[in-house]
Image: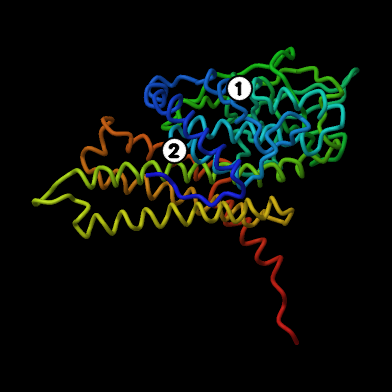
Amino acid sequence: MPVERELPTPEAGDLLALTREIADAELAPRAAQYEREERFPREVFRLLGDAGLMGLPFGEDVGGGGQPYEVYLQVVEELAARWASVALGVSVHTLSCFPVDNFGTEAQRRDLLPDMVGGQLLGAYCLSEAHAGSDPAAMRAGARAGADGWVASGEKAWVTHGGHADFYSTFLRTPDDGERAISCFHLTPDLAGFSAAPPEQKMGLTGSTTAAIRLDDVPVPADRLVGERGRGMGIALAALDSGRLGVSAVAVGLAQSALDLAVSYAVEREAFGRPIAQHQGVSFLLADMAAAVESARAMYLVAARRKDAGKPYSRQASIAKLVATDAAMKVTTDAVQVLGGAGYTRDHPAERYMREAKVMQIFEGTNQIQRMVIGRHLTAEAVPPAG
């Protein structure tokens, strides 16, 4: 069913209508087959780039759409309702552009950003490592000073678009800047010694390639350093706050699709002489699913509006990610339950939705990490009682 949205401008409404039109025509018909074949939809990202949907939250001065996050995230949600892998790709691409946009030099923003946000180039974000998924400060991959810049070595894990991306926002330890110092680099796959491992074999989101990136003494030009050397952790954490909002929107779009499927099935499927939607056990289940979806949507919009207003939003982003991805897992699981045996077969997308939802509780910081972040914010903000 169409989602009722409160948008800030009539132009935003037109953008959402365009998104739905493209998503219905180009994403929905491809999704099941591409996921089944574990096929990466590179041509779909080019199509979205041509439509201006790959750079929506970036400034018009660098070729972006100049849209507030409140609008951009609802575009991502609409894409996710048709194909979660593609919506996730848009979110990851946005995350990958963040360091240059917010911390790059004037030359980097001028020379790199237009092609990045224009959508013909696809980005990846390299922070995690196999042994340090939730603890990026423990990373081992590093960059040492070289004759004409840097030399990078090591391996980054769980890289969305790994092996397909045109640029990689990569975080590496730079020990010359301090024992725990990390710096951010803009890497491209044409650099000597840069390679991707075979894709991971995943239970869901199989149309979204995930692979490790190997750096075998890769020579990195000096002008590929993004932001101040040794200050990369701050860049990474700032990017993750916005990235968590993207994941929240993807999760809500996926959950909305699962809800729509369950409702459609429940009003058509009959048992004991009437549609199963009229049985209280099913109708209550659908009601809880709807409440979870709408609550999650409201939470990511609260966080997005704070970001758009220039207010701190880190705690709200973690809450949104926690609420939305837990909701997606519950709603997709309940959708399988509503469909019963049919939901456990590949004749319906319910089982795929359920598999896709699981990883959303893991990436961009596990939901256990989100609880830690939220708790730390609460205790830091607490005011001691008077006296």
* Image quarter (top left, top right, bottom left or bottom right) of the N terminus: top left
In the picture, measured across the screen, residue 148 lies left or right of residue 378, that is: right
Residue 6 place in picture, x, y as percent: 54, 52
366 or 179: which is nearer to us?
366
**Element carrying mark 1:** helix
Picture quarter with the C terminus: bottom right
Disc 2 secondary structure class? helix
Residue 294, by quadrant, is bottom left
Which residue, given by chain and number where applicable, does mark 1 sit on?
A: 50
Farthest-out residue, right: 147
Question: Amino acid type of disc 1?
Answer: Asp
Residue under the image location 86 percent in, 24 percent down: 223
**Front position among marks 1 and 2:** 1
Percent position of residue 112, x then y: 78, 24
Identify the residue at horizontal 55%, vertical 50% (top origin). 321
38, 25: nearer the viewer? 25
Residue of label 2: 81
Mark positioned earlier in the residue sequence (1 or 2): 1
Could you classify mark 2 by the number of other residues whose Cα lies within 10 Å: few (under 14), some (14-19), or many (20 or more)? many
Report the Cα–Cα distance between label 1 and label 2.
Answer: 21 Å
